Image (tube, rainbow, N blue to C red):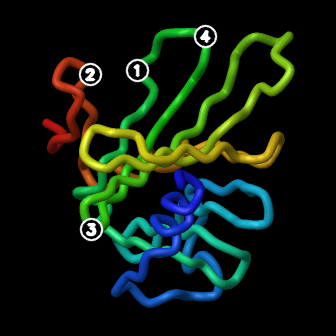
Amino acid sequence: MRAALVLALLAAPVATPLWAACQGDMGFSCQIGDKSLDVCYWKGMLTYLYGPDGKPELTISEPFETVAFTPWPGIGRSLWETVAFRNDGYTYEVWTSVDRDPEATEPRTGGVRVLQGETTVAELTCDPGTATPMETLYDLKDAIGQCWDRDSQTWGLCN
């Protein structure tokens, strides 16, 4: 039952046009089995794509100014970041993590967590060795004049 729900959620139709691949620049990418998980940015938009290469089953685009990007808080053994896309009552939270321990067997991981409200309904992990860092998104927020406030955990205009 849960597997059917995951497939239905990830293949839900969207109004955003589907393109063959990332249009613009890649912000994050990984493989999950025979499917790709990509986050792309182009012309002020951040786009989530999930599905077979060149034929995404789900595409969600949001203006970069308002997309929910959470940078690494600067503490802990792992450097992690998330970006969340909302679509039809669901949130698709893409995450990446780098374990700073030189002995770590898989130092870079990533994936997507699908939430309905506050409830996790699916979690997919990138194939080992395929997750890329998401650090470019912080630089893009900075470039449009937004600064991260660690205390409030929000983006705002830089002073």
From mark 3 to mark 1, how far is it between C-alphas?
29 Å
Q: Answer yes or no: do the residues labelled 3 and 1 have beta carbons within 8 Å? A: no
Q: What amino acid does circle 4 point to? A: Arg
The amino acid beneath tag 3 is Asp
Q: Amino acid at mark 1?
A: Pro
Please tell me the numbered disc located at residue 150.
2
Residue for badge 3: 88
Residue at horizontal 21%, vertical 35%? 154
In the rendered image, which quarter is residue 60 located in? bottom left
Does label 3 or label 1 sit earlier along the sequence?
1
Alpha-carbon distance for marks 2 and 3? 29 Å
User: Depth-wise, is mark 3 or mark 1 nearer the camera?
Assistant: 3
Mark 2 to mark 1: distance in Å? 7 Å
* 148 left or right of 133 in image: left
Label 1: which residue?
A: 73
Q: Secondary structure at mark 4?
A: loop
Q: Nearer the viewer, residue 151 or 142?
A: 151
Q: Which residue is mark 4?
A: 77
Whole-number angstrom distance, CA of label 1 to CA of label 4:
11 Å
Mark 2 or 3, nearer chain start: 3
- Where is the C terminus found, in terms of image quarters? top left
Query: Could you say which quadrant of the image residue 92 lies in?
Result: bottom left
